[in-house]
Amino acid sequence: MSKPADANDECVGPESEQAGKASSCAGCPNQSSCASGEGPKAPEVDPAIASAMARVKQRVLVLSGKGGVGKSTFSTQLAYGLARRGLKVGLLDLDICGPSIPTMLGLQGREVHQSNSGWSPVFMDVQSDEDAPEEGELCVMSIGFLMPDSDSAVIWRGPRKTGLISQFLGSVDYGELDYLVVDTPPGTSDEHISIVQLLKPCFGPTDGAVVVTTPQEVAMADVRKELNFCKQTGINVLGIVENMAPMKLPFDNLSFFNTSGKDCTEDTLKELKEKCPSIYEQMRISVDVFPRAGGGPEKMAKVFDVPYIGQVPLNRELQNACDRGDPSHLSGENYLPIRNVVQHVIDRTNPTLLEEKKRAALEEKKVENTGKSGVVSIQGGKMFM
């Protein structure tokens, strides 16, 4: 049995003989039930949240524990990438004090509306992949849509944040979704405990979290705490993503200077094109911005016995696209790392989903073609097909 989300940090576990009796149990809300042998009470299911989540096939949390690792950027690309594959996706921005997702998706100034079925999220167009079984859909919910302007500060204590999280989970009409991607703030505090308590009772066996990190030790130290949080609260870790991995740049993105500091970029590129055209056109320069510590995120994944999904390189095109609010720009080699992550998430959560959608699309097309070919005409009292 996993450690309850509201347990003390030094919880010995409800299955321990010392449960409810150890000194670390003092002050824990579960102390009396653990001491009696009953164990912690099962979390109560909010009826509104249960009703909303019943229409969602898969739920994916994006966690880190560390700020500044590109979690919101990754959440945006994961949600948009799932929609590109022809899926119906919701993106919930729970970074209440720093809601950047509306900016990254070009949705600033958009508003949510109230209806009999709840708040209506903001929908946006998706440029689906060529092999997508159908057109993808993406809807977004964020506190950024509720603020008077983008520079307004959210100065709230825990209970008010918890109340908003509950509303975002239970009072928003997301409709029928294949995936709900939940972007969370850094840390393991109030918001995370609230998310787990409110959402985990609705989790299916393949729902879980993607944990994002950068390769330096300063980031991984906090991410290890997040991995332990997942372990203690029983959150399935779908995998670790190494974000901001070494940049891969074409020569056109580089500047060249001689030892005196003179800019020689134009002459250098001209010489490369003339004398080494294959190198100029086919090779990329790798720039390792963040030092990899102690085997990096891949080794950390092995230590915690969770999947290592792979690297998402630093990408200046992605950075520019986020500032412009244009997530559709990624293609070719720039899109491949995100597509690989998206495929991993699909494989870990619902591996048959895309095939089922393809079969359904083919059946629908057959029905349409049958209807078109089966035109009935009547001439002289006789029926002709």
Image (spheres, rainbow, N blue to C red):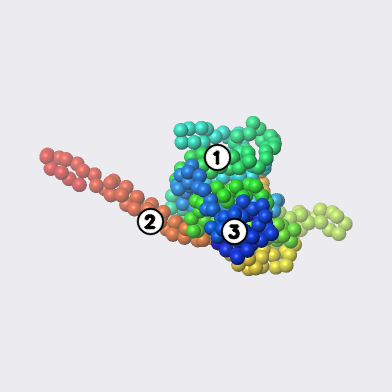
Q: Secondary structure at mark 1?
A: helix
Mark sitting on residue 351: none
> Which numbered mark, 1 or 3, is in the foreground of this view?
3
Which residue occupies the foreground of this view, 203 or 83? 203
Asked if residue 1 is positioned above or below residue 125 in the image, the reply reads below
Q: Quadrant of residue 103?
A: top right
Query: In terms of sequence position, does the residue under pointer 1 or pointer 2 come before the other?
Result: 1
Q: Amino acid at mark 1?
A: Gln
Q: Return the residue at label 2.
A: 359
Residue at image mark 1:
167
Q: Which mark is residue 35?
A: 3
Q: Amino acid at mark 3?
A: Ala
Q: Earlier in the sequence, mark 3 or mark 2?
A: 3
Residue 240 visible in the current orientation: no
Q: CA distance from mark 1 to mark 2?
A: 36 Å
Residue name at image x 63 percent, y 66 percent: 304
Classify mark 3: residues with Cα within 10 Å, few (<14), some (14-19) or many (20+): some
Residue closer to the observer: 258 or 5: 5
The one nearer the camera, 285 or 243, is 243
